[in-house]
C-alpha cells in the first residue's frame, strides 16, 4: 500500500468511526464497547470486461462470508453504456450482470443474470439461504420473489401474479422489498412491501402461504389511505409503504423496517407484537429505516440501521433501541452515502452497504476494536 493510500484510509477512518451520541441516555453500552468501522476505499476491486454498476438495490452475505449483490442494469445512463451499443460509441461501458458475488478482499467470484425469462421488472433485495440458494425480489407491480441455485439456475417463484390485490392476499405479493429465510423451519419471510403493508411467510420448499400480519401484529392489515407521517403524531397503527426490510435474530425475533414511519417493529415468529423503536423520528423525507442488520456477536447486542434519507448508519442497542452512534453523511466519497439502501454483515462484523439512486455503488466498512 502506498503512503498516500494509507493516509487516505487513516483520514476516512476518523470520519466513519462514529461519535457517541450525546442524547443516548437510554443506551447501556459503554463508549469503548460500541463497534467502530473504517471505510475500505479500494473494495471491491475493479470489475472485468468493462462492466459498470447501475443502482445497487440489494446486498447480502452468505455462510461462507461471500458478498452477493444485485443491481439494476437497466438504470445505466446513456453515457455509461456506449461500449455495449452496436457499433460501440465509446470505450466505456457495459452493464455488469445483475447478480455478482465477491470475497471479503473484493475479488469477483461469480456473476449471472436473468435465467431464461424468469426475472423481475425492477431488482429489489437479495438473500442467500443456508444451502447457498439465492433469492431475488422486485418492487414493480407484478414482481414476486424468485429462487435460484448458486450458479443462477431458476428454481421457483414464490408468490403468484394472479390478479388478486391487497395486504390480505394469500397468493400475490404487492411489490415486495426484502426477504429472509428461517432455514430450520423452511420458511421465507417477505417485507411486502411497496404495495402491501405486511410481513408474509411462505414455505420455502413448496411456496405455499403460511401466515401474514401487519403493524402491531394485526392479522388483517388494511390498505386505506394513510395520513403523512408526523413526528408529533401518535405511533401509527399501520405500516406505511414501503415495508422495507425483515430480519431474524438468533433468539427468534422478527425485526421489520417501517421505513417512512421511522421505526423498527419487533415481533415473534407467529406475528405477535413485542415492541417498537423509533429511529431519527424527525425525518420527513423518504424515512430513516431503510434496512438493518444485527451484530455478529452471539447475543446480537447491536443493530446497525441504514438511514438512506439522512445518508448515515446508526448503531442502536438491540435491547432498548437506544441510539449509540451515527456516522456518514450525504456525499460520494468513501464513507459517505447517497441513498444507502441495504446493509449486510459478515462473520467478523464487517459491514457492506449498497446505494441506489445516483449512489450506484457498494462499500465495505471494516470493523475495528
Image: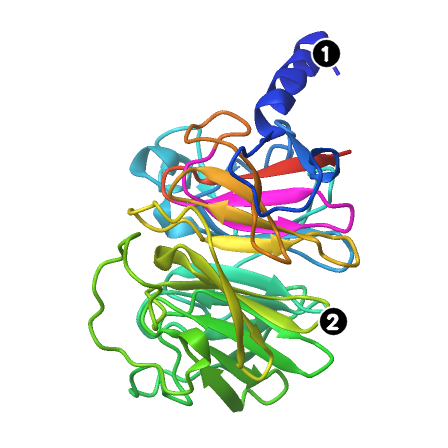
SS at mark 2? Answer: loop
**Does the magenta portion include 352?**
yes
Check the image and report above or below for 182 versus 340: below
Between residue 325 and residue 66, name the one nearer to us: 325
**Does the magenta portion include 366?**
no
Quadrant where the C terminus is found in the figure:
top right
In the picture, measured across the screen, residue 359 lies left or right of residue 317, that is left
Between residue 84 and residue 248, name the one nearer to us: 248
Check the image and report above or below for 12 versus 32: above
Q: Which numbered dot is residue 109?
A: none
Q: Give the CA separation, mark 2 to mark 1.
A: 40 Å
**Residue at position x 59%, y 56% in the image:** 320
Quadrant where the N terminus is found in the figure:
top right
SS at mark 1? Answer: loop
Residue 198 at x, y = what percent? 41, 76
Picture quadrant where residue 160 is located: bottom left
Is residue 164 in sight in this rendering? yes
Residue 265 at x, y = what percent? 49, 66
Start and end of the magenta stretch?
A: 337-356
Picture quadrant where residue 339 is located: top left
**Residue at position x 69%, y 52% in the image:** 295
Q: Which numbered dot is residue 131?
A: 2
Between residue 358 and residue 28, name the one nearer to us: 28
In the picture, measured across the screen, residue 336 lies left or right of residue 366, that is left
* Colour scheme of the rendered structure: rainbow
What residue is pinned by disc 1?
Answer: 2
Residue 233 at x, y = what percent? 28, 59
In the picture, measured across the screen, residue 312 lies left or right of residue 226, that is right
Outermost residue, top side: 3
> Of label 2 and label 1, which has the lower sequence position?
1
Is residue 48 in sight in this rendering? no
Amino acid at each position: 500500500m502506498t503512503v498516500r493510500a494509507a493516509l487516505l484510509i487513516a483520514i476516512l477512518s476518523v470520519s466513519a468511526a462514529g461519535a457517541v451520541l450525546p442524547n443516548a441516555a437510554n443506551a447501556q453500552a459503554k463508549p469503548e464497547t460500541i463497534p467502530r468501522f473504517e471505510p475500505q476505499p479500494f473494495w471491491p476491486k475493479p470489475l472485468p470486461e468493462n462492466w459498470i454498476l447501475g443502482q445497487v438495490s440489494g446486498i447480502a452475505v452468505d455462510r461462507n462470508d461471500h458478498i452477493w449483490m444485485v443491481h439494476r442494469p437497466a438504470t445505466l445512463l446513456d453515457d455509461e453504456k456506449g461500449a455495449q451499443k452496436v457499433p460501440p460509441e465509446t470505450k466505456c461501458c457495459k452493464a455488469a450482470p445483475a447478480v455478482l458475488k465477491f470475497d471479503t478482499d473484493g475479488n469477483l467470484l461469480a456473476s449471472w443474470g436473468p435465467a431464461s425469462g424468469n426475472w423481475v421488472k425492477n431488482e429489489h433485495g437479495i438473500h442467500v439461504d443456508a444451502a447457498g440458494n439465492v433469492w431475488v425480489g422486485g418492487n414493480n407491480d407484478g414482481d414476486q420473489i424468485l429462487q435460484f441455485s448458486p450458479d443462477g439456475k431458476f428454481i421457483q417463484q414464490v408468490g403468484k401474479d394472479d390478479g388478486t390485490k391487497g395486504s390480505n392476499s394469500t397468493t400475490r405479493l404487492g411489490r415486495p422489498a426484502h426477504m429472509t429465510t428461517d432455514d430450520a423451519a423452511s420458511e421465507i419471510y417477505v417485507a411486502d412491501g411497496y404495495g402491501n403493508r405486511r410481513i408474509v411467510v411462505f414455505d420455502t420448499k413448496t411456496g405455499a402461504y403460511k401466515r401474514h400480519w401487519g403493524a402491531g401484529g394485526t392479522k388483517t392489515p388494511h390498505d386505506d389511505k394513510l395520513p403523512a407521517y408526523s413526528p408529533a403524531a401518535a405511533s401509527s397503527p399501520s405500516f406505511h409503504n414501503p415495508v422495507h426490510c425483515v430480519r431474524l435474530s438468533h433468539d427468534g425475533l422478527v425485526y421489520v423496517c417501517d421505513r417512512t414511519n421511522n421505526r423498527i417493529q419487533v415481533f415473534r415468529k407467529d406475528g405477535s407484537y413485542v415492541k417498537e423503536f423509533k429511529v431519527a423520528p424527525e425525518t420527513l423525507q423518504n424515512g430513516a429505516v431503510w434496512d438493518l442488520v444485527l451484530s455478529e456477536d452471539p447475543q446480537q447486542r447491536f443493530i446497525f440501521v441504514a438511514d438512506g434519507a439522512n445518508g448515515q448508519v446508526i448503531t442502536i442497542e438491540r435491547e432498548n433501541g437506544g441510539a449509540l452512534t451515527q456516522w456518514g453523511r450525504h456525499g460520494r466519497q468513501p464513507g459517505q452515502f447517497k441513498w444507502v439502501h441495504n446493509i449486510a454483515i459478515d462473520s467478523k462484523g464487517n459491514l457492506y452497504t449498497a446505494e441506489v439512486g445516483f449512489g450506484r455503488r457498494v462499500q465495505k466498512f471494516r470493523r475495528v476494536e
